[in-house]
Image (tube, rainbow, N blue to C red):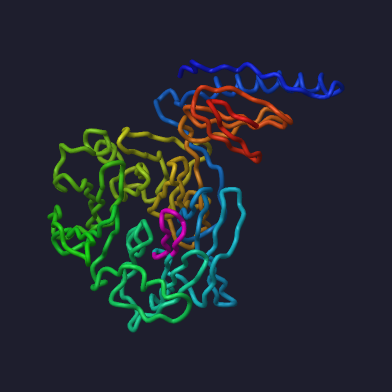
Amino acid sequence: MEWSGVDLGMSVVAVRPHWSEWVSWLFCAARFACLLGMFATSGNSVAANGLLSARIVASFDFRGKVRFCYDHDPAIIHFEYDKEKNLTDIRSRSINGDVRTIFQFTGTGDERSLSCSQDGSTIAALDGDRQRLFVLRDAQASIYRFGVPLVYSVIGKYSLLSPDGSTIGVPGVPVHVSGPDVLSRMRLFPPDKSKDVFFEDGEAYVDEAGSIDVYSYSDGWKKKRSMRKPGEYFYVREVARCGSRTVISLSDDKRSRFGTLDENLSGRADWLARIGVRNLLATFSDVVSIDGGYGRCVFPLLRKHDVRGVLQEIVSFGDDGVRRFKIEGAPLAMSDDEIRLSKDGCYALFGAFKRIPEVPQFTMPQQAVVLRFDVPDCKQQRTFGDLSMSYNYPGFTVASPLPCAVVKVKYRISCRGGLRCETRWSSIII
């Protein structure tokens, strides 16, 4: 990668005379760190086999579903059940391990139902009996009750709550029990919960017996079109936005099928084939679902017929093509069938067994794992002695203990770290 147009000359800084030698030394150290960091991290970490690298940046002991849920700084939400007290916490956990309880209710929670809007402002979940609905919006909790417990749980990431937090997928009108009546300001869909619904890009996809029906909202939900499924027994596992395409994952519990909204679901010479996704799914196990959002999608590469679920690679893709990531360190076996991406596509979240099992069992020790992808458009942290620095391609930033410094950079700047920085006229002020 070329770093043309970079001026690393330091501006003149007035200091008290007896500090001049110390500041001069730090200026030199900062300049060296900047140069070293730029050239050491300016390109992809690409192995000889063409794979990019990913490494574990956080993990904690946990058995259950985990979800990304935040506005700006990456954070995870999950249930935490106290058996002795019969209480369940909905907890938020930052990447660096800070934990807080955002809501508590009696009984257990339905793991698959835990949902979060893309801006992190709305969380929805069902209790373990699927008789109560909890909606948390703007730090306020609302509780609803169904007349009859739901027979089925939700299946997709946005099956209970839409990405923008405006729609809830529940049957009929739940009875308001306590808190603000937030559902009175939301849309409800569908009336028949025996049919799975998936919300994406302002539309609702309903899994019918032989088709997928697409609805949009305009003074009520109206059916726009219908797509035939590739077979009678296929059901929808996930609907995800991958760049400018909406990708649908289907399965009959033995085989999987994948297609895009604007193409025939049973076709082969399509976008997924052109970018190489179909070839990967033919080479590795296709008993997976494709998840995504914010412009990219993700799925795991697992060996065919390997019941242990040992993760070979992680694939992310979008309009700019396919990226394949090899995880640094010891191999991991997935304990769940889901991989979630952060908003910037730089982090992946999934469940894994703490040891690779011969035959996976839910009761085995498990953990939630957060990976960071080593690619130029993801923020990286580097430490050089007492100087820490980060870059955000195509620019870079410098964090330094210097009392005052100006580093001129002709690229876009993204300030990170504990100090507040400002960007003006292609320069960063620390």
233 to the left or right of 391: left
Image height check: is 137 above or below 132? above
Q: Front-most of 131 and 167?
A: 167
- Please give the count of numbered marks on the rendered protein: 0
Residue 120 within the segment the image draws in magenta: yes
For the point 36% across and 73% down, the residue is 184
Furthest residue toward bottom? 147
Q: Can I make out residue 302 in this image?
A: no
Position above or below: 421 against 191: above
Placement of 342 over or under 105, stated as above or below: above
Q: Is residue 341 above or below residue 13?
A: below
The span picked out in magenta is: 113-123
The residue drawn where x is 50% and y is 77% is 107
Would you say 11 lies left or right of 414 here? Answer: right
State which quadrant residue 155 falls in: bottom left
- The answer to whether residue 100 is visible is yes
Question: Which quarter shows the N terminus?
Answer: top left
Tell me residue 205's x, y (percent). Answer: 23, 59
Nearest the camera: 333 or 14?
Answer: 14
Residue in the foreground of this view, choosing between 93 and 62 = 93
Q: Quadrant of the C terminus?
A: top right
At horizontal 68% and vertical 31% (from top left) the residue drawn is 400
Q: Position of residue 422 (x, y in %)?
A: 59, 35
> Residue 393: x, y in percent?
48, 29
Residue 287 locus on image (x, y percent): 29, 50
Look at the image and say whether residue 353 sits in the magenta stretch: no
